[in-house]
Amino acid sequence: MDSHRLGAALPRVIGWLNRTNARHPWSHNDRLHRWIARRLPDRRRSVLDVGCGQGLLAWRLSHRFGRVLAIDVDAPQVAATAARCADRPNVTARVASFAEVDGTFDGITMVAVLHHLDLEDALPRIRRLLAPGGRLFVIGLARSETRIDLAWDLLSSVTNPLIGVILHPRPVRDPPSGDPFPTKDPDVTLSELRAAFARHLPGARFRRRLGFRHTIEWTAPAR
Ligand SMILES: C[S@@+](CC[C@H](N)C(=O)[O-])C[C@H]1O[C@@H](n2cnc3c(N)ncnc32)[C@H](O)[C@@H]1O
């Protein structure tokens, strides 16, 4: 195909991708909850879910930890979490910013949240809040910059509708318009994130994921 015909076909391909994505939606965040569940720390007295959104992860964690504190700066998200976890007395849902939290936790989870926070405040705070052996799990978004980032974006764009069709073969009649929680485009790149973690939480393990995501895990050292 010459470049002229390719240019003419591109908008149709993008239109088809968008229509298929809308009719077979799937959560790029929720699908990675299993990645967290497989890596929980040995001691599971308490966990902090930062930016809890609609509360699905807090509900899931409540079966694995003695106590769950779910926080979000957005009051409707906290109300949704409290409603979802009404049958889980070990879950506390609270309107709060991560910058205000104190205490000690065996786990901290941040799903699609770290890019909302000030890294230079958040990373040292994670270190202070985690008990020795406690674990941090981040499912994150980063701004694309390098050719490798763009190649992963392209792979995610192509696989997105395929994964949607596999997970939800029946097309949705009235696709939801927009997300149920506040969102923000990431302005920090993966290499900037790696550098910040190397300064504050050395040894963190990064992995790129389909669905425009990466994961980061870190274990607090014995004091
Ligand atoms: C993209 S949503 C993700 C929600 C949820 N974790 C999920 O996976 O569905 C990001 C959430 O982080 C919350 N948030 C943003 N800044 C925050 C902060 N400083 N402290 C706590 N939550 C924050 C937003 O209100 C929003 O609900």
Image (spheres, rainbow, N blue to C red):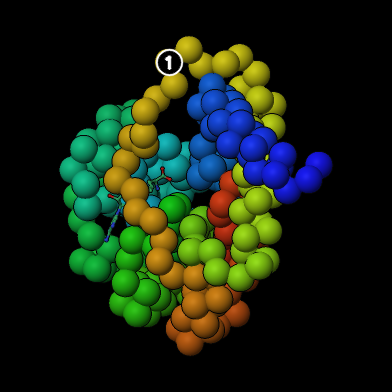
Picture coordinates of residue 194, whole percent (x, y) = 54, 77
Q: Is 182 placed above or below 115 here?
A: above
Q: Which residue is pictured at 21% across the width and 38% down the height? A: 76
Picture coordinates of residue 157, whole percent (x, y) = 62, 44
Name the image quarter holding the N terminus: top right
Say which residue label 1 marks: 174
Of 57 and 106, the residue lying toward us: 57
Q: Which residue is pictured at 26% across the width and 50% down the height? A: 72
Left or right of 94: which side holds 67?
Answer: right
Establish whether ligand 1 lies closer than 8 Å to the Cβ of label 1.
Answer: no
Q: Secondary structure at mark 1?
A: loop
Q: Is 16 placed above or below 148 here?
A: above
Number of disc labels: 1
Q: Quadrant of residue 177?
A: top left
Could one spot residue 169 in this view of the protein?
yes
Q: Quadrant of residue 102?
A: bottom left
Q: Which residue is pictured at 26% across the width and 40% down the height? A: 77
Q: Residue furthest right?
A: 1
Of 15 and 122, the residue lying toward us: 15
Of 35 and 103, the residue lying toward us: 35
Q: Which residue is pictured at 65% across the width and 43% down the height? A: 7
Q: Quadrant of residue 91?
A: top left
- Say which amino acid is labelled 1: Asp
Could one spot residue 209 in this view of the protein?
no
Q: Is 193 placed above or below 210 here?
A: below
Picture coordinates of residue 56, whole percent (x, y) = 42, 37
Q: Dot 1: within a 10 Å radius of its alpha carbon, few (fewer than 14), some, or many (20 or more) residues?
A: few
Picture coordinates of residue 221, whole percent (x, y) = 53, 80
